[in-house]
Each structure stands twice: as C-alpha cells, then as structure tokens.
Amino acid sequence: MIELRGVGKRFGDRVLFEGLDLDLVPGKTTVIMGRSGSGKSTLLRLINQLERHDTGTVRLSPIEIPAGLPHGEWVRQATALRRRTGMVFQGFQLFPHLCVLDNVTLAPRTVQGVARAVAEQKARALLELVGMGEAVDRFPARLSGGEAQRVAIARALATEPEVLLLDEPTSALDPASTASVVAVIQDLKQRGFTLAMVTHDPELGQSLADHLVELK
C-alpha cells in the first residue's frame, strides 16, 4: 500500500535514518518502536508527508514522491497522498470550539464536499464504533484524555482513509483510558484496517504488531 524505498531524514548534521525500506501491508498493523529521539514520530509524519524526506521515495500508487521535488509539485503530491490517509496525533488536536459531532464531520464536509446529513450519519456510526456514541453534543473540554483520543480516531476514519496512522495514541493516558483506546485499536485491527502506530510501550507494540519496526 505505502512503500518507502531508500528513505533518509536528517536535521542539520544529525541523521535520524537513512536507506530505510518499509512497506505498510494492506490489512496489517505495523508498529514503530525505538528509544526516545530515534525518529519514530518523524517517520510516521514522513509517511504522511507532514515531513519531507531527504533521500529516497515514498509511494502510494499511483502517487510517487521522490526526494528533492520542487516545492509546488511536492505540495500537490503530498496533498493527494494525505487525502488517502488518516492521522491520529498524540495531542488529540480536536477543535475546542466544535462539538464532537462537528469535529468528526468537518473534514468530510469541507475537504470532500459530503453533504452535512450524510457526513453526520457516518460520524454517528463511527462514534458508536469507538464507544463515543453518546458524546455527539459534548465539547472537547468535557472529554477525558481517552475519550478525546477515541473521538480523534473517529475523526481520522471519517474520510475513509486507506491507512490509519497513530502517533503514540496512549501516551500520557491513565490505565483505564489506555485500555479503552487499545480496545478500539484492537477492534480496528480485527476488522482489517491497515494501521501504522508509534508507541513507546514494548508490551503494547508486540501485542498489536503484525510487523514490528525498531529504530535504533
């Protein structure tokens, strides 16, 4: 589905990784692990082209993004790739002025042009899927960390992405909230979603991974 070939990333003189080959296989869960500062989150953002790579190529057929594209062409290709992926951020990044339902429907309505009634019907189904069906009218300030992360997962799924990327989805959550988020991820895995997840938790990563990537 998504292929990285010979990919490298550096910040100044610091090389995070180079010559990296990685396939995100349809219907499988890829877990990215490694020590703090090894580039786990950067790699996930690079897959989604929120970060540019310095060498190599990122592909999501027929999109192909080699390093060094002129800025305008990179923006065009990266935007096309992002429209086929969903991203769940470590800090949730829900819009505080929008209720849960509006947070989930925003991208389908504004980016994909989906009618409000259709978007809301789909959003309600997704919120039920992640156990947040009763929270449609609540605002982010009234959600716990685990609840906010489950809403963020529903929001990422609302555009029907081909792959879902999760950046430390249980970071800083209490045990009960962590369990609720992990249960949602396990359910998505069982339903055959293509997932790529960064985690600092070796036990969690090994329990979820079909493919395990460790950055040194």
Image (cartoon, rainbow, N blue to C red):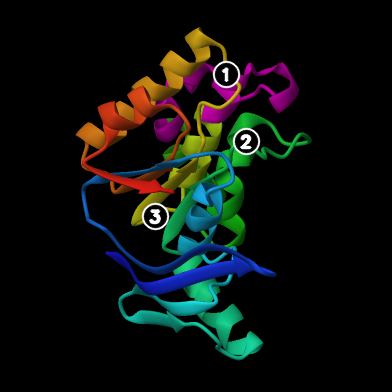
Q: Which secondary structure, mark 3? A: loop
For marks 3 and 1 on the same chain, the one whose residue lies earlier in the sequence: 3
Amino acid at dot 3: Pro
Select label 2 or label 3 by which is in front: 2
Question: Extreme top residue here?
Answer: 176
Q: Is residue 136 magenta?
A: yes
Select label 3 or label 1 by which is in front: 1
To which residue does mark 2 refer?
92
Q: Nearer the viewer, residue 19 or 31?
A: 19
To which residue does mark 3 refer?
161
For marks 2 and 3 on the same chain, the one whose residue lies earlier in the sequence: 2
Choose top left, top right, bottom left or bottom right for residue 6.
Answer: bottom left
Q: Which secondary structure, mark 2? A: loop
Image-based side of 65 in relation to 151, left or right: left
Residue drawn at 22 percent across, 55 percent down: 26
Choose top left, top right, bottom left or bottom right for residue 139.
Answer: top right
Q: Which residues are magenta?
A: 125-149
Residue 80 in percent (x, y) is at: 48, 74
Circles 3, 1 touching at the beta carbon (< 8 Å): no
To which residue does mark 1 refer?
173
Residue 66 in percent (x, y) is at: 45, 84
Residue drawn at 72 percent across, 36 percent down: 98
Residue 88 visible in image: yes
Amino acid at dot 1: Leu
Q: Main secondary structure of the magenta part?
A: helix
